[in-house]
Image: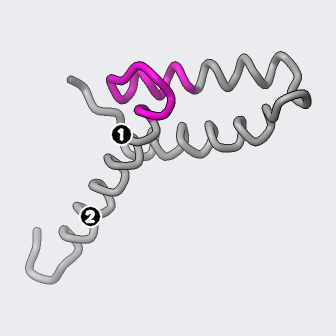
Amino acid sequence: MLLAHPDVLRDLVERHAALERAAAPGTADPAVRQELADVTYTLCVSTGTRDAEAALRVARHRLAQAEADHEEAALPGRH
């Protein structure tokens, strides 16, 4: 399975959070709800999952792993 770049996942997670806040029940216009649905779908496709909660969980796990890998690579003596 192809894995989305961490920058792409980070953007999707951040957009999803912002859109969820904007799509509060009774306040969001249809365009915001549609964009939230689109971002949720893209998160699901990017993580190989079928629902928003699982997609966010997998994306956050991959982001944490990417950060850990980056920190490990920055240690002295690592190439």
Whole-percent x and y of residue 38? 61, 19
Whole-percent x and y of residue 23? 79, 32
Which residue is drawn at the image coordinates 70% and 43% (left, top)? Answer: 18
Residue type at tag 2: Ala
Which residue is drawn at the image coordinates 54% and 42% (left, top)? Answer: 13
Residue bearing the label numbered 1: 58
Residue furthest to the bottom in view is: 76
Residue 33 included in the magenta stretch of the image = no
Residue 47 included in the magenta stretch of the image = yes
Judged from the image, the secondary structure of the residue bearing numbered disc 2 is helix
Magenta residues, start to end: 40-55
Front-most of residues 52 and 32:
52
Residue bearing the label numbered 2: 68
C-beta proximity under 8 Å, tags 1 and 2:
no
Which residue is drawn at the image coordinates 90% and 27% (left, top)? Answer: 26
Left or right: 14 as drawn, with respect to 79:
right
**Quadrant where the C terminus lies?**
bottom left
